[in-house]
Amino acid sequence: MKKQLLTLFMMLAAVTASAQIVLWNGDDKEVDSDGGFWNRADPTVIEDGSNKCLKATLKANPGGWDQEHHNIALPVGDADFKGLRRLTFRMKMEDKHNVMVQLEGKDGAYNVKRIFWYDTPGEWQTMVYEYSVGPDEDKITDTNNNVIAIWPYEETADGEGKTIYIDDIQLEGPMLKDGAAIRTLADGSLTSKQVEITGSLSKGKYQCTWDGDWHTVDYDDYSLLLSKLSADVCFLNLTGAAVTDGDGPQLRTKNHNLLILSPTDFYDTDNVIRWDGEKNITPKMVLDESYPFYTPIDFTATAVQVTRSIKAGINTMCLPFYVGQAEISTNCKIATYTSSTADAVNFTTADHADANVPFLATAVDAAATELNFTNKGVVNTPESFSEPFIGIYVPKSAEGKYGINDDGKFQKGASGATVKSFHALMTTIPAGARSVTIDGISTGINNISVKNPIQNIYNLNGVRVDKVGNKGLYIINGKKVIVK
């Protein structure tokens, strides 16, 4: 069976030339040796320009196994497939033809075949064989696979006397730094703040056959990796991986704040930090208060967009870069925490806040939902903040902590209260404290433990109200509460 129509051939999306598991290449092989292949079709390592590869000449079978010298066989019994199932190699031959790869199990346990179309006579072409689909793929083991046999003309004698060149036989796909194949992990099992990927990341489609019908096979290492990531992952290090057809937007669908440190051939998309060994630059960093944020490294962002709720009056903030007053809004004043005394929590105005320093932003314009900055030096995230005024980079419970309410006062959160990223909290306030001061001017503390929004609030006259107002007695969720 031959593939007759070139229109059936799928143009393979760029496949990386390096991978984490190399089964064979000629670089470390001795010229004029068989390079470790079985003695079929006279395998010989040669120099092809500056590259070393395998040359084989298909010939009539002198006896023994039928068609033995019509294939090139490489023992792989000691190779660890590590859950990877995409086999690639580079090939050069004289004819357009179907090329079959047969993966044989130990002691004949299985004999898995895939066929790919070679159509660039006299030129090197990357051949791709996906073993995660098709018959018997479940029989392939990580180790103790017996041999890979490459049949340039399928199981026929069509190529007798033809010369074939092979190089860079390898398994491709993403892996963790410790060697675990991403494919073998449970969905959502990657929960660390930062994850380092090795191996290769690419995506594309091609056509192959195992049953006489051509099947379009899609592969997408980014989708595969995304399925293993949890929303907790904030920093993805790809500098140890071979990356092509980069898909940052897909990787960021679970955590919109995900930062991707990547080789320079990754596409220019939001939150991709380009790494060239000396500096880290991302064209644009896009942050959202609803998702966690973390970076273990410093880098420069030429533009930053932060989406978060902002109200007129006083807001708590914490950002991973230096910010000046006017960068928040025209009328903004910045105040940083100085001390807590027996009767007050004290802040002092400043003309800026340094990276990772929580602050109050006062007199901010109303109804803002987006802050934009330019040329920011982003600073690595501290493992913890100095109490009692702490920055928040991971949405979490605010129960028992103090945040700013709609009246611009610190208010204690009850069960169910939450705080989002790029805000700040007071973890404790002295029991006798009745005010928050900014340059000595009091703003006030509401020490009532409530959940926001509050349900079932009545004043002393039995009239239901939307929120606690002036001092006095209130009935909140059936309990008497005195507001002083």
Image: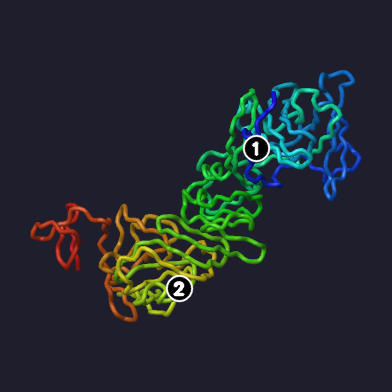
Residue found 38% across the figure and 76% down from its top = 335
Give amino acid for label 1.
Leu
- Above or below 433: residue 177: above
Residue found 58% across the figure and 55% down from its top = 267
Number of callouts in the render? Answer: 2
Nearest the camera: 47 or 160?
160
Residue found 43% across the figure and 55% down from its top = 291
Q: Position of residue 63 (x, y in %)?
A: 88, 18
Q: Are marks 2 and 1 in contact (CB under 8 Å)?
A: no
Q: Position of residue 196 (x, y in %)?
A: 60, 51
When asked about the image quadrant of residue 442, the answer is bottom left
- Marks 2 and 1 sit apart, C-alpha to C-alpha, by 46 Å
- For label 2, the SS is strand
* Image quadrant where one finds the C terminus: bottom left
* Image quadrant where one finds the N terminus: top right
When asked about the image quadrant of residue 213, the answer is top right
Neighbours of disc 1 within 10 Å: few (<14), some (14-19), many (20+): many
When asked about the image quadrant of residue 424, the answer is bottom left
In this picture, residue 306 sits left or right of residue 474 = right
Nearest the camera: 83 or 280?
280
In this picture, residue 49 sits left or right of residue 348 = right
Outermost residue, right side: 32
- For label 1, the SS is loop
Residue 61 visible within the image: yes
Residue 388 visible within the image: no
Give amino acid for label 2.
Val
To which residue does mark 1 refer?
A: 84
Q: Earlier along the polypeptide chain: callout 2 or callout 1?
A: 1
Q: Position of residue 394 (x, y in %)?
A: 44, 57
Q: Position of residue 282 (x, y in %)?
A: 55, 63
To which residue does mark 2 refer?
A: 323
